Image: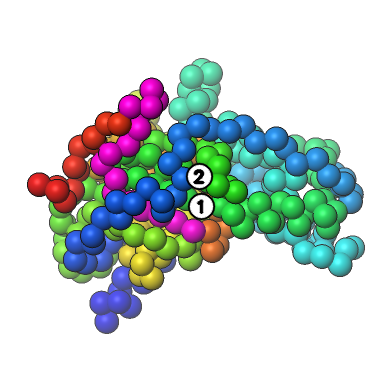
Amino acid sequence: MIKKMILIAAMIGFSCGNTNRENVVTHNNNSIAPNNNVIRKEIPIRDSILQWVKVPEDILVKNYFKFMDKLILKADTFKNWHINEYILVHANPWILDSLRSFDYYEKMEEGIFVYDQRELIILHKNDSLAIPDSAFAWKISKKLETSVIDVNLPEFKLRLFQNGDTIFTCPVRVGRDGEKFIFVVGHIINLRTPIGIGEIKWIDRMHKVINLDTGKEYTGTNRDDKHFTKIPIIPWIEPAINGIRYGVMIHPTTNPETLGKAYSHGCIGTNEKDAWTIYYNAPKGTKVIFRYDLKVLNEKGDTIVLNDIYHLFD
């Protein structure tokens, strides 16, 4: 019964909590993932384009995924291989750049207040979208198969690897060191982010954020700058760690002041723009590592010891 409640809670938005569990022994093994802090700018893949498709009308963010699904379905009717949303975006990298540019706080730095990101235009009428040929699609697919998400919890840092190289690094927040009664689950849970290795099992592109204390959906969010806005449409992804789906997700936060802290109900939080980059490089099956390494190298190459946020070595 408890397992059933946990699964239901995760599906409706119990995304910052996890089930009761025993403390997991830390994976203090640098060989789990490359310990590479250098971000390598990837050279874009240049290959053949099968066809260019014109966007027939302005597409709002709230209709973006529906449009992409229809476009992919239509594209599959005139060729004998399959493309998906990830392949299409990697063949048109400007789409990801545009999605990242809608980050609320970046817009505020430009002097633009965005109340509802869902009403912004992401694809304009007559924009051209490249449909890749089979060779180009295959190269993109093979690259994505090498993706690994690596999060060192006490470092509050997420790294994205492809082909063993660091292609992206961003700050995150992690689960608190404590326990709490969660209404939507009906019992006390451990708030720590689980430690271990797993893979992405579930992706929610149109996630509804639920108040864990009431079970009701949030209608909006209070920003760090005291403004109230609608909650943006940005995908949430859920890994299973050590074969268990804890309900812990990797997702954007509308309060980036909490990044670099043990703050959440177990989830890994990122800012809005970084959540898009993670999503489009981490399809289902992507390997995920949540580790707890206190000794790391700083930017100068010196070994430093991080704060033991979960008191595992006290």
Percent from the top left, x then y, of residue 204? 50, 59
Percent from the top left, x then y, of residue 116? 51, 38
The one of 52 and 209 positioned closer to us in this rendering: 52
Left or right? Give the position of 216 relative to 20: right
The one of 53 and 29 positioned closer to us in this rendering: 29
Q: Residue at x 35, y 45 (%)?
A: 152
**Residue 290 part of the magenta segment:** yes
What residue is pinned by disc 1? 148
User: Which region is colored magenta?
Assistant: 287-302
Q: Residue at x 61, y 57 (%)?
A: 145
Q: Earlier in the sequence, mark 1 or mark 2?
A: 1
The one of 295 and 107 positioned closer to us in this rendering: 295
Q: Is residue 213 visible?
A: no
User: In which quadrant of the rendered view does residue 78 lie?
Assistant: bottom right
Label of residue 160 in the image: 2
Mark 1 secondary-structure assignment: strand
Percent from the top left, x then y, of residue 294? 26, 41
**Residue 241 part of the magenta segment:** no
Mark 2 secondary-structure assignment: strand
Evaluate if marks 1 and 2 touch, with contact meaning CB atoms under 8 Å apart. Answer: yes
Q: Residue at x 30, y 31 (%)?
A: 303
Left or right? Give the position of 250 relative to 102: left
Q: Residue furthest bottom?
A: 1
Q: The disc labelled 1 sits on which kind of residue?
A: Val
Percent from the top left, x then y, of residue 71? 77, 56
User: Around disc 1, counting alpha carbons within 10 Å, would you say few (fewer than 14), some (14 to 19), or many (20 or more)?
Assistant: many
Quadrant containing the N terminus is bottom left
Q: How many marks?
A: 2
Q: Residue furthest left?
A: 314
